[in-house]
Amino acid sequence: MLIFKIVALLAKKTKFLVYKVTLLHAKIRLLRIANKALSKRCKAKKTRIRQEGVLTIKDAYNIISQIKVNKQIRRDKRLEEKNQSDKNLTVQRCSTYKETSYNLRTC
């Protein structure tokens, strides 16, 4: 009887290991696919950079200054929009007295 229990236990553990190995193989396959896609993107980026040619220091400074200008323009637009929306705010007034200091709770 003891031998049968040990064999049954070994069979159960072996089955568990087979399932685990199957899951690990599936995970490895998914990781390989993701890694392949990532390397394609990196390779495409490097190729695009190579095709654009040599970047001089002057060009780099121009690019950096253009980025700063674009950021400033976006910041100014946001401030303008905020100021514009602040001007369009309406002040709530009491329907009876038409005053801003009154409201339904104080009337």
Image (cartoon, helix red, strand yellow):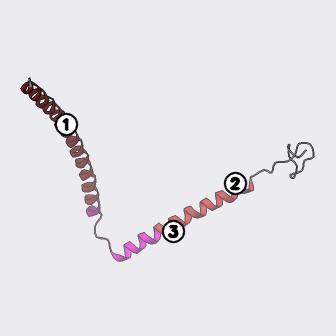
- Residue 20's tag is 1
Residue for badge 3: 69
Between discs 2 and 1, the one toward the N terminus:
1
Residue at the spot 43% in from the left edge and 70% down from the top edge: 64
Residue at the spot 18% in from the left edge and 35% down from the top edge: 22
**Residue type marked 1:** Lys
Instruction: Work out how far the residue at label 2 is from the one at label 1, CA to CA, in angstroms.
Output: 59 Å
Mark 2 element type? helix
Kindly report which numbered mark, 3 or 2, lies closer to the viewer in this rendering.
2
- Residue 11's tag is none
Kindly report which numbered mark, 3 or 1, lies closer to the viewer in this rendering.
1
Between discs 3 and 2, the one toward the N terminus:
3
Instruction: Magenta stretch: give its range.
Output: 48-66
Residue for badge 2: 85
Determine the residue located farthest toward the front in the rendered image.
Answer: 1
Instruction: Work out how far the residue at label 3 is from the one at label 1, CA to CA, in angstroms.
Output: 56 Å
Kindly report which numbered mark, 2 or 1, lies closer to the viewer in this rendering.
1
Which quarter of the picture shows residue 10?
Answer: top left
Which quarter of the picture shows residue 14?
Answer: top left
Residue at the spot 28% in from the left edge and 67% down from the top edge: 53
Can you give x and y, in whole percent of width and height, for residue 61 in the image? Answer: 41, 74
Mark 3 element type? helix
